[in-house]
Image: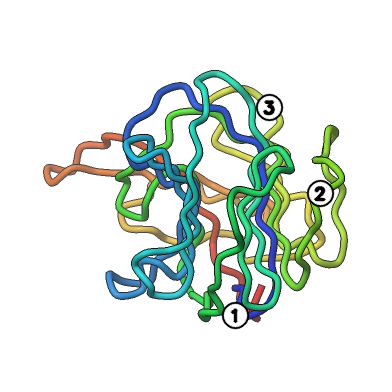
Amino acid sequence: NFGTGDFTVDFYARFNNFNGPMMLLSKEVNATDYYKFGVSYNSNADHLCLFLGTSPGGTCRSWDPSLNQWYHLAFVRSGSNVYLFVDGVRLGDPGVDSEDADSTASLRIGATPHGSQIFDGYLDELRISKGIARDFSQGVPTQEYTTDSYTKLLLHMNGENGSSRFEDSSLFTRPAFAREGQVTGAIDRDSRLTRYAYEYDTSGNQIGTYQFIPNAAGGG
């Protein structure tokens, strides 16, 4: 939960395909709170976007990436200003968004909470920092991140492709698991691991997966 304070969300991304709107990260409590927090890329409009609070428009900036190329993406709020960076270069002018981004929902990675707008590609070194607007003007990290007191989530994404377990290397402790619709499979008892949620059609057939991270009690 970011509230109305400073934060930084940054990671590396590589696109395998462009599928129109693709949600890289999202949090939702209900339909009204869809935009409590979201990060997306829309290949139809060539827009990289950050959504906060309940405003439908978000802060979007033009960006035209290439397939199969790694990019460092960063989304930063400092005071009431929001910034979008690609490889350390700011996209356009700062936006203004001081909306409350708190939400009790789980964080979804690679899709909306409903399993739509699926991101087809790779993510690496996902870091969520609260209470700091990190500066990327002097360059972007080229090695694995190390955690600090501001880091609330840190996923190195090491391991085999298709893995359903990613260790959280931050210092922050969160609940071990959460039930999400018809989530199945063994419950992971390690509170530092994330899990995959499973998407089902109306007949109960599994049609896809997306990763989710339980929201931390106590304002993480």
Q: Residues within 10 Å of mark 2 (few under 14, many from 20)?
A: few
Quick check: 76 above or below 29? above
- Which amino acid lies under the numbered mark 3 shown in the image of this protein? Gly
Question: Would you call the spot at circle 1 few (<14 residues within 10 Å), some (14-19), or many (20 or more)?
Answer: some
Q: Residue furthest front?
A: 93
> Could you tell me the amino acid type at mark 1?
Gly
The residue drawn where x is 35% and y is 40% is 45
Q: Judge whether residue 214 can be spotted in this image.
A: yes
Name which quarter of the figure residue 176 lies in.
bottom right
Q: Which residue is under mark 3?
A: 159
Mark 1 or mark 2, whichever is nearer to me: 2
Quadrant where the image shows the N terminus: bottom right
Q: Upstream in the sequence, badge 2 or badge 3?
A: 2
Which residue bears the numbered disc 2? Answer: 137
Q: Calculate the distance from the C-alpha at mark 2 to the C-alpha at mark 3.
A: 30 Å
Q: Is residue 108 visible?
A: no
Q: Is residue 128 above or below residue 218?
A: above
Distance (Cα) linking label 1 and label 3? 33 Å
Residue at disc 2, secondary structure: loop
Residue placed under numbered mark 1 in the picture: 3
> Hey, which residue is sitting farthest top in the picture?
68
Q: CA distance from mark 1 to mark 2?
A: 25 Å
